[in-house]
Amino acid sequence: MAVAIQTGNELGFLPADTLNKMFRAEWVRLTAIANLQALPPPRIDRIQAAEGRTDSDILLLRSKDPFGASRISYLGALVKWASGGERAPLGVLVSIPTWHLMMLHVLSGPGVAKVLERMAVTGQIEFAEATAAIPGSVRTSFRRSRRPETDRRAARRHGPRD
């Protein structure tokens, strides 16, 4: 597990063990959620897995930033916002095929049978399109990239651990 850190146009990762040495876990979680909520909200598209069945609605949340998938860290509030306040007493299905796309379905009836198939197919297509758009040289260099520096000065700049 790692924490993504965006600096300008670069995206780096800080390993969880390094992060835990520098900061309190609860402070990191709360700060990350606050930062996510400060980003522009994702665009919401609504599709139906079975035409005319509202119990087959799927919400597609598309983010321009690379932290779209991270919004799962405040799933309850996200579902309430995206669904217009719809309650989810039976739960929510979530699919995250790319960093920029999260699919949500609020369980409400037998339409879920069609939802599962539609989310799986849509997820496969979105993932294939997203990975095909990344040049091979970028994928290779990304795997080999160094982790961001994690010295004591960084800890002082970003909220030291108590």
Image (spheres, rainbow, N blue to C red):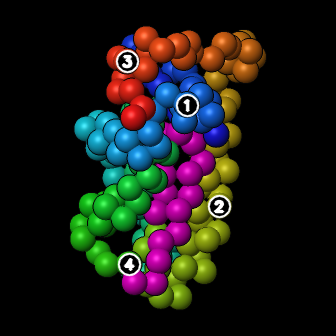
Which label sits on residue 21?
A: 1
Callout 3: few (<14), some (14-19), or many (20+) C-alpha neighbours within 10 Å?
Answer: few
Q: Is residue 101 above or below residue 103?
A: above
| Alpha carbon separation for disc pair 3 and 4 | 41 Å
Where residue 57 appears, x then y in whole percent? Answer: 43, 71
Does residue 138 appear in the picture of this structure? Answer: no
The amino acid at mark 4 is Ala
Determine which residue is flagged by label 4: 88
Question: Which residue is label 2 attached to?
Answer: 120
Name which residue lies at 38% across and 55% down: 74
Element at label 1: helix
Q: Which mark is residue 156?
A: 3
Task: Give whichever of discs 3 and 2 has the lower sequence position.
Answer: 2
Closer to the camera in the image, 102 or 58: 102
Residue range highlighted in magenta? 89-104
Q: CA distance from mark 1 to mark 4?
A: 37 Å
Question: Is 139 located above or below residue 62 in the figure?
Answer: above
Q: Mark 1: few, some, or many residues within 10 Å (few <14, many ≥20)?
A: few
Comes first in the chain, label 1 or label 4: 1
88 or 25, which is in the foreground? 25
Disc 4 versus disc 2: distance between alpha carbons? 21 Å
- Counting from the top left corner in percent of width and height, residue 131 is at 66, 32
Disc nearest the viewer among 4 and 2: 4
Residue 142 shown in magenta: no
In the image, taking residue 81 as reference, residue 128 lies left or right, namely: right
